[in-house]
Amino acid sequence: MTEMIVGKSLSKTYRTLVDTVSVFENLELKIDKGSMVALVGESGRGKTTLLNIISGLDRPSTGEVWFGGERIDTLDEEMLSDFRNRHVGFIFQHHYLLEDFTALENVLLPLRIGGKTIGEKEKEKAKELLSRVGLSDRLRHYPDQLSGGERQRVAIVRALIHDPDVVFADEPTGSLDRRNADRVEAILWELCRSMGKTFVVATHNMELARKCDAVISL
């Protein structure tokens, strides 16, 4: 299979007032295009840190990050921001929806940030994706009018609206009850599979990890 993400000799350290803390050292990883991969490990082992590094939100202390054949850890901040806007979708434990925007407006936000003109084509795509996650009757609702599970489904669609190469998720169902978590996970799986997306999730949930094509343990 084609490699989408490659990490070479990745290390991450943080300096404190009295010491240097190592999160991980000389980590090697490969993630294939179209695969679903879980990053697992106890709290403090660096799951979120690694997720941030391979998605371009952070940089390794040493090592290289390659994404779609391009080395990204050496890009300057402007180029890295542009790279994320074009190639990456993010889903976090908290939905981070803008309270003054409707569900539809929140979904379209990444396109606006990327400088794309929002026309009927873009609106119809957003509506179609929201319909696929069961929110066709919630397009004009604001976040405070949606349940926790509904808000997270809006966040999933927002992560996919600009057709990213990879979707990164950090404990995407961690704040939901089991029933809503199961539903959101099923929707996320179906969308990523049907759209052919590479999916990388940092999680404590081993049931979620077992559904993935590969598991990276830290």
Image (tube, helix red, strand yellow):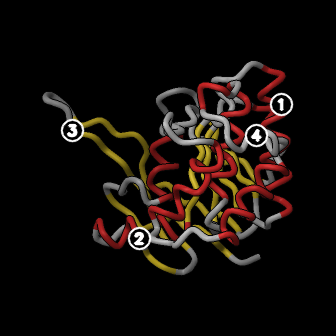
Amino acid on which disc 3 is placed: Arg
Residue corresponding to mark 1:
182
Residue at figure coordinates x 30%, y 69% from the top left: 78
- Estimate the spatial distance between the alpha carbons at disc 3 and disc 2, rounded to whole Å: 29 Å
Residue 197, horizontal then vertical, whole percent = 73, 64
Residue corresponding to mark 2:
82
Amino acid on which disc 4 is placed: Ala
Is residue 207 visible in the rendered structure shown here?
yes
| Crowd class of label 2 (few under 14; some 14 to 19; many from 20; radius 10 Å) | few
- Estimate the spatial distance between the alpha carbons at disc 4 and disc 3, rounded to whole Å: 32 Å
Residue at figure coordinates x 74%, y 64% from the top left: 124
Give the image quarter of residue 49.
Answer: top left
Residue corresponding to mark 4:
209
Horizontally, residue 42 falls left or right of residue 191, namely: left
Horizontally, residue 3 falls left or right of residue 218, namely: right
Dot 4 or dot 2, earlier in sequence: 2
- Estimate the spatial distance between the alpha carbons at disc 1 and disc 3, rounded to whole Å: 39 Å
Give SS at disc 1. Answer: helix
Furthest toward the bottom, the residue is 69
